[in-house]
Structures are given as structure tokens and as C-alpha cells.
Amino acid sequence: MPTTDHPRHAESPRSPDPSGSFVVTSWNIRHGGGAQRMGAIVLEILATTPDLVLLTECRRTTLGQIAAALADHGLNQRAESMPPDTGNGTFLAGRCRVEQVGPVPPGVPPGRWLHARVPDLDLEVLGVHIPDARRPTERAACWQGVLTAARASPGSPLLIIGDLNTGRHMQDEPGRTFTNTAMLGQLASLGYVDGWRHLHPGEREFSWFSHAGRGFRIDHALCAPALRGRLVDARYVHHVRRDGLSDHAALTVTLRMSPRA
């Protein structure tokens, strides 16, 4: 793992190349990453050459070290949404200035929601970790918050990204067990596109597997209409799950710079 024992030199936010593109990496790192997994997790994040990193299931016990290691490699602009205890939270690190947007919607559990602007990339990021179906009230509050945010700024370059704990029947799962699929339909009616599905129509990949070995694609990047034409690439990094660094695959999304950025 990149160490932080040496003094770090403060690095100013990077000014991106307006003609280029940038990478957003999203990953549920499972229970904070764990002391034994932290080093490899950081190295795998850096291997995706990200300009922005969204991590869910962060924990205070390990986040400081992970954040410091990312900062050593230029990802030193940050925002976080952490619960008051040692539970799971959400963290965003970037090479450009990050401006957190609040407040968290009513009923959304602490640590499950992080809304930020990245002005130099002409991007808004809504990082979410939506509770699973065992917590229906909190799950409904999260989805209502997502839909409210999507409707609030119809022309904004909003990227909704993270562990959504749902997908499309028969596409993102073999059967029909998902709940809240109607919420994905409502986002689609607002013009949002599933970045990976848009670029890989008809294909099937799973980002998480149950203990019974059933695969599901529950980690998503949903692009607002303003981002659709800027979408370059979306792919899953599966070996990090197979290698046991997390129970989730990582997701990377590449977007073009906005002409006006």
C-alpha cells in the first residue's frame, strides 16, 4: 500500500484538459476495506487511473488511511458522508475541486448519500448506497431522494452512481427477484441512461454474487440526458471481486469533457 509516513506535499486541484476525457471509479469496498485488504484496494483503485473515486461501505477505522494514500497520488479533493458511529459511509475523492451539496433527504440513513459538484469537469455526482429490500422504509426514502434530485435539475450533468441494490429483471439477474425496478423506469422516463447497458446492449455481467452463487448486476452509473453524449466507456473490474478484495466488482465510467468546461 502507498505509505503516508513521509510528509505529503499539498497539491492544488488539477485543471483538466477541455479536449480530453476523465474516469470515474465507483466501488463498494465491503465493510470499510479491512486492515488486510486496504493496501490492495488502494492499488486497484489507482490502476483504473481515476479522476474521481466514489467508495461505498467506507468506515472511519480505515478511511483516513485510504484517503491519505489516494491524496498521495493526486486525489486530494474530497467529500464524505459518514454515520456518527462506526457504520458504513460514502466517500468521494477527486483531482479537481469537489463541492458537497446538501442536505441529505429526510429518511435517508447517514452514510448512504453523497451529492457533490465538480465544477472543473462540469459534472454533478450523486453517490448512493441504497439499502437492500430488508430495510424497505429506508430504501424507499433513498429512491425518493434520487428521483427528487433527478427531477430538480432536468438539464444538469448529473451522474447517479453507486450500489443501487436493484436492476432489470432477466437482464441484470437470471430471474425476477429485484424490487424497485419501477424506480429505474422512472429515471429512464426522465431521460437517464444506464451507462454500461447503453454501451453493451444485450450483454450480461454481474457485479455481485449471493452466497448461493447467484449473480446480480446492482452497481450502476445512470447518466442524465446532458451526459449521454459525453459517455465514452463503462466497464466492470471483476477480478477485484474474484480475488476477494470485496464482494463487489468495481465500475469505471469514462466521460468526455464538456465543450463549455
Image: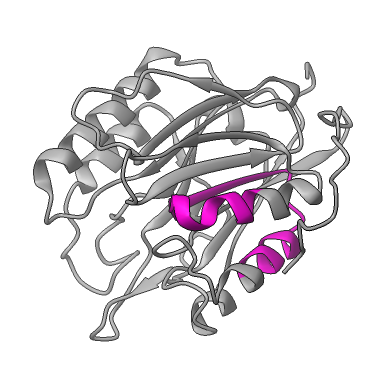
- What residue range appears in magenta? 41-67
Is 122 drawn above or below residue 88 in the view shown? above
Left or right of 224 on screen, residue 78 = right
Is 29 drawn above or below residue 11 in the view shown? below
Q: x, y percentage for residue 150?
A: 39, 24
Left or right of 15 on screen, residue 140 = left
Q: x, y percentage for residue 132?
A: 21, 55
Left or right of 248 on screen, residue 185 = left
Residue 59 in magenta stretch: yes
Is 233 drawn above or below residue 242 in the view shown? above
Colour theme? one colour
Instruction: Please state, as top left, top right, bottom left or bottom right, where the N terminus lies in the image.
Output: bottom right
Q: Which residue appears at 58% of the width and 49% of the height?
A: 64
Residue 214 in magenta stretch: no
Q: Which residue appears at 53% of the width and 23% of the height?
A: 100
| Front residue of 94 and 188 | 94
| Front residue of 76 and 165 | 76
